[in-house]
Image: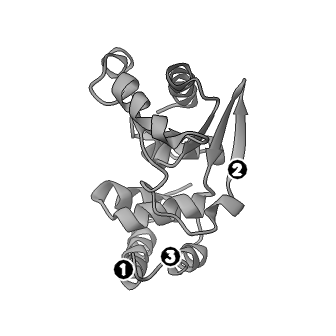
Amino acid sequence: MQLSELEHVLRAAAEITKETSFVIVGSQAILLIARDVPPALLVSTELDLYPAMHPEKADLIDGAIGALSMFHDTYGFHADGVSPETAVMPPDWQDRQTLHYLGKLTAICPELHDLAVSKCVAGRDKDADYVRTLLAHGLIDLATLLERIRSLDGVRYPVPHVVAWAERRALEASQHPTSP
């Protein structure tokens, strides 16, 4: 996904929901929160988001511009209307969120370490690639990532397992470094 595509999805989501502020919790938030993003981090064709003031309207987004929609077929990218619970992030992630103004629209994005926490908790192959690339390019710091993971609710999430998963990604990133 490119920044222009992210902006297109946001405009379409705003038109559908009649909302102007959206929280972007998926991997493509990096388009707004980092510069010189490695191409390996831009392979996703979906933008995970929900209306900030009315998260329940995310279903409208999914139905109109989600996967397999006419929007998706036409443009080759799409939105994934998610809920605030979709991405597991540290309890204080909103203290570090950033606001990005795109015309009359506002995109609210987690800080990159907080976004990486959600990838570590999800633990899929694509998440491993994402976190490994973030670490290899020095976009996130392992100590900060581990600190944020440890701040998760240990009753709800397998924190030691997630810490070990992140440490393995860091080891892999150090064994196969890439040039930033």
Q: 174 above or below 50?
A: below
Q: What residue does disc 2 label?
A: 98
Q: Earlier in the sequence, mark 1 or mark 2?
A: 2
Residues marked 1 and 2 touching at CB (< 8 Å): no
Whether residue 164 can be seen here: yes
Q: 72 above or below 96?
A: above
Q: Amino acid at mark 1?
A: Pro
From the top left corner, tell me how far across and down residue 28 is, in percent: 50, 42
Q: What residue does disc 3 label?
A: 152
* Kind of element beneath mark 1: loop
Q: Earlier in the sequence, mark 3 or mark 2?
A: 2
Crowding at mark 1 (Cα within 10 Å: few <14, some 14-19, many 20+): some
Question: Residue at 52% of width from left, 47% of height from top?
Answer: 38
Q: Which mark is residue 158?
A: 1
**Closer mark to the observer between disc 3 and disc 2:** 3
Q: Amino acid at mark 3?
A: Leu
- In three-dimensional space, the C-alpha distance between marks 3 and 1, rounded to whole angstroms, equals 9 Å
Whether residue 78 can be seen here: no
Q: Amino acid at mark 2?
A: Thr
Q: 77 above or below 133?
A: above
Question: Residue at 67% of width from left, 54% of height from top?
Answer: 97
Question: Residue at 60% of width from left, 28% of height from top?
Answer: 19
From the top left corner, tell me how far across and down residue 104 is, in percent: 72, 24
